[in-house]
Image (tube, grey):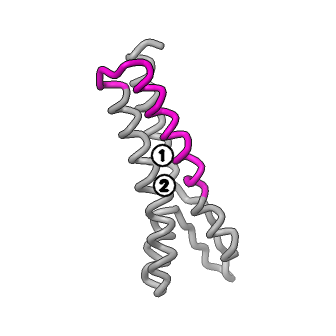
Amino acid sequence: MDASLILSLMLVASGALALGLTLPVVYLRRGLSRDTYSVLTGIVDLAEGDNVLLALIVLVFSVVFPIAKLAALLVILLLRLSEAQRAGAIRVLSLLGRWSMLDVFVVVILV
């Protein structure tokens, strides 16, 4: 694949991640009032509600982990690695990717 195409896709992925973290994902309606929550505001509300451990889990696996994976992919792209080294690094990232749904499972258990 062309490096400029990969960089463009990574830029789109970064933008989609930013939108996914900041746009509302939950709408709650109580009487006449409506509340919206994004992933980031949900993390803040969990921390303010004395659910700091849960807030940290969601923060790590919803914010830090995806940013770290995108950064690692960028490093793999920019470094001059052999095909074997590149394949090994991508294999490690794919193994770590299995943990990226942990925050979803935690939220499902809470609901």
Is residue 50 found inside the magenta-colored segment of the image?
Answer: no
Is residue 90 found inside the magenta-colored segment of the image?
Answer: yes
Task: Inspect the image, locate mark 2, and give the three-letter code of the amino acid beneath it.
Answer: Leu
Q: Residues within 10 Å of mark 2 (few under 14, many from 20)?
A: some
**Who is closer to the viewer here, 83 or 24?**
83
Q: Which residue is mark 2?
A: 21
Q: Which residue is mark 1?
A: 17
**Who is closer to the viewer here, 39 or 73?**
73
Please say if the residues under marks 1 and 2 sit with CB atoms less than 8 Å apart.
Answer: yes
Task: Inspect the image, locate mark 1, and give the three-letter code of the amino acid beneath it.
Answer: Leu
Label of residue 78 in the image = none
Picture residue at 61% right of the left edge, 78% below the top: 33
Callout 1 secondary element: helix
Give the spatial CA distance, label 1 vs label 2: 6 Å
Considering every residue shown, the one lying at the far front of the view is: 84
**Quarter location, residue 95:** top right
Side (left or right) of 29 relative to 70 = right
Q: Which residues are magenta?
A: 77-101
Picture residue at 44% right of the left edge, 71% below the top: 56
Q: Residues within 10 Å of mark 1 (few under 14, many from 20)?
A: some
Picture residue at 63% right of the left edge, 69% below the top: 107
Q: Position of residue 13 (x, y in %)?
A: 48, 36
